[in-house]
Amino acid sequence: MPELPEVETTKNGISPHIDQQCISDIVVRNHNLRWPVLSNLAELCIEQTIQSVQRRSKYLLLRLDHGCIIIHLGMSGSLTITNDTSGLKKHDHVDICFENGVILRYNDPRRFGAILWTENPEAHPRLTTLGPEPLGRAFNSQHLALVCANKTAAIKAVIMNAKWVVGVGNIYANEALFHSNIHPETPANQLNTNQINKLCKQIKCVLRLAIKAGGTTLKDFSQADGKPGYFQQKLWVYGRAGEDCLHCQHTIRRINQQQRASYICPNCQPTP
DNA sequence: CGAACGACCTGCAGGC
DNA sequence: TGCCTGCAGGTCGTTC
């Protein structure tokens, strides 16, 4: 599920419930996530207060008095706020319990996600290699131009590589490239300045709109099945193979790239 | 260093 | 109904 907008939505949904709250217990029912959940995680965190809830890339950072819990939702993870200790569902792997009765519950069918603990997130290997936030000032057309220069790889692979810019997943890579009239297989170093500028702008635009759309589901967040959805979000190409381009009425095509689906309008995004 | 690809895991839709 | 195949929003580690 989660691309950057959903992680941001999740952060905004859980933060009011757990910020400044003291952890009373952590229950791990399945340690076997992408990396094993520390067996002493509870010991490390009990009696500590959440000082802040932050997002970096698609990672959520729960900063404690000492140390930090790092959560990644992988492909299928989700966090919900509950106070129901009995109504467990399949794949409810971890509960972070607070003194006020609130439970932050981690569910992840595919277990591609992770719950890590670190003394110092600024030095954590998962975080130190990350590129700039797409919505921040450090991600601009100058940066993107520099990144693309000398790269023969497909532009879609480049913008999905967290080393160069974080948080752009398959959906929004496709959408941003469509709105920029760039074919996803175009070698990065073949893009001209106008295309770079446009792509940079569209990445920001598409992500901002999606966060806005995710935000509309926030009020339901604390309910049991309060999964943020994309129903407010208009997708122009992703998942629309065989349908008409909303811009020019040509038929959207699906191609495979890096063993993942790319969707293009052959008219709006000419082959390189 | 960059680029390509397999790996991790479950659930679901579609075909037979 | 069941079995099989292919596909899914991420990203790490290995290899060339």
Image: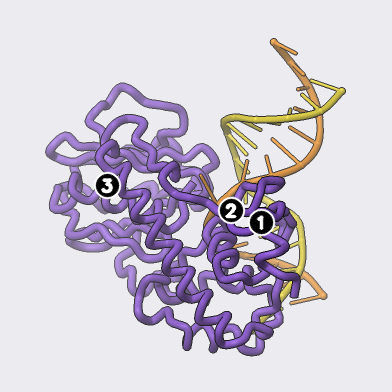
Chain colours: A purple, B yellow, C orange
Q: Is residue A191 above or below residue A72?
A: below
Q: Quadrant of residue A100?
A: top left
**Which of the pair C3/A195 is nearer the observer?**
A195
On the image, the x and y values in percent for residue A110 come to 55, 41
x and y, in percent, of residue A29 in the image: 40, 35
The residue under label 2 is A246
Mark closer to the observer (1, 2): 2
Q: Report which quarter residue A210 is drawn in.
A: bottom left
Q: Where's residue B14, x and y in %?
A: 73, 30
Amino acid type for the residue under numbered disc 3 = Gly
Q: Residue at horizontal 36%, vertical 56%?
A: A211
| Residue identified by numbered label 3 | A13
Name the element at disc 3: helix
Q: Which mark is residue A263?
A: 1
| Three-letter code, disc 1 | Tyr
Camera-side mark, 1 or 3: 1
Residue depicted at 64% across the width and 58% down the height: A248
